[in-house]
Image: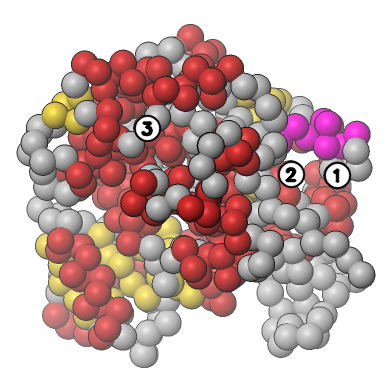
Amino acid sequence: MHHILIVEDEPIIRSALRRLLERNHYQVSEAGSVQEAQEQYRIPSFDLIISDLRLPGAPGTEMIKLAEPTPVLIMTSYASLRSAVDSMRLGAIDYIAKPFDHDEMLQTVARIIQDHQQAKSDGAEDADPQQLDTEQPLTDNTDIGIIGSSAAMQTLYSKIRKVAPTDSNVLIQGESGTGKELVARALHNLSKRAKAPMISVNCAAIPETLIESELFGHEKGAFTGAVTARTGLVEAADGGTLFLDEIGELPLEAQARLLRVLQEGEIRRVGSVQSQKVDVRLVAATHRDLKALAKTGGFREDLYYRLHVIALHLPALRDRENDVLEIAEILLERQRQRMDKEPMSFTEQAKLALQKYSWPGNVRELENALERAVILCEGSQVTTELMGIDVDLAAENSSQTTPSTAPAADTAIAADPEPETELAASDLSLEDYFQHFVLEHQDQMTETELARKLGISRKCLWERRQRFGIPRRKTTGA
């Protein structure tokens, strides 16, 4: 059983995190400060340290030196995001924002412990896998860290190995949920920058009014609320890799600044007249057609060609032959172990359904379906019904080649003979309920109100819109 130390001065947060980890079969100890942790425990003996950034007395980053070589996960609020990135540069293995999602915390903890154990077994004491993303690789049995043996994936692996050692910009293209961030991580880990930070940014998750400040930093007094100078994420990635996910959502003004980074290798903070040099390798990802977007003025054409030095296409799960079964087996075992259930296997009908279904949400949808199946399963056999997928629509869905930005969910719902407002929630899967609720209420509610009603974050709302192809309604000006 892995032993984790929580260093958090808020008793409520500390207690809640302890219960979460203990329910998932971790042994947990706790302390309210760095000093208390030093006095009560031999810190390097733990498998993982989870520490708040702001603590009474010494800051949480002090645990990094005290715990070495044990990895330290830093918890921070969104307002302290910049400090969290700074802590990464000091040697923290990762950070997670409060209030954290329980599944995100468990995935992050599992990934860190697994990576640390793998590094020790490989004799890689010098490894320092600094990563900001929380998506867990499906397997670590290859240098790439992605599972799948289909011809399309083998071609992708070959390209990754050729491209990774270079400093060329890379554009990763693929549908939402296919694992673009895993490809970015593989490029970083196989590059000469592997020991430097990999800074991951979801361009769609940051408010448009803050994106330039977040990326490029700002000077004190640059705008209302800028009470101190701030380092940007591009600068934080100096010497390492900058991963911009959903770069198609980047505002045009920020695109112009990013172009200067690629052309001149320098940045200028918001409100500053001085430029400074940076050395970053840019890896970008998108599910959108940037070339078509550039022709309509939605994306800078000169930036597109700067990004498109090397293009890697990540195939959709439905195009990966028998990979879906291989991935499903691993995900099923992972979920079973996490929930401490007896060994499970798929029925033959379920295996056929896994292959027949088109998986519009790709690996992310598959993972959600199997989590639901493990929760509901009362025996050892996972059936099609437990996964909650509609196999009858598979052929229809897979034959449609509409762009990912088209409102595919609208089409599916419009074809239902029953009025959507009269459908009982008990008749719907979680995915169906989400689509119906958003389509029915998005004209009357803001994104914040929709997220609150659904009990999810704005980022989660955006990600699900992308998964189901539900675009945000454009508000018209006066």
Q: CA distance from mark 3 to mark 1?
A: 35 Å
User: Where's residue 423, x and y in %?
Assistant: 45, 50
Q: Is residue 246 left or right of residue 193?
A: right
Q: Is residue 382 left or right of residue 34?
A: left
User: Is residue 99 at all visible to an observer of this figure?
Assistant: yes
User: Where's residue 20, x and y in %?
Assistant: 22, 65
User: Where's residue 308, x and y in %?
Assistant: 77, 30
Q: Residues within 10 Å of mark 2 (few under 14, many from 20)?
A: many
Q: Quadrant of residue 405?
A: top right
Callout in the foreground (2, 3): 3
Report the residue marked by disc 3: 389
Magenta stretch: give its range: 286-295
Seen from the viewer's position, the closer of residues 320 and 373 is 373
Q: Are marks 2 and 1 in contact (CB under 8 Å)?
A: yes
Question: Under tag 1, what secondary structure?
Answer: loop
Q: Are marks 2 and 3 in contact (CB under 8 Å)?
A: no
N-term-proximal mark, 2 vs 1 = 2
Q: Residues within 10 Å of mark 1 (few under 14, many from 20)?
A: some
Q: CA distance from mark 2 to mark 1?
A: 8 Å
292 part of magenta stretch:
yes
Report the residue marked by disc 1: 298
Q: Residue furthest top?
A: 151
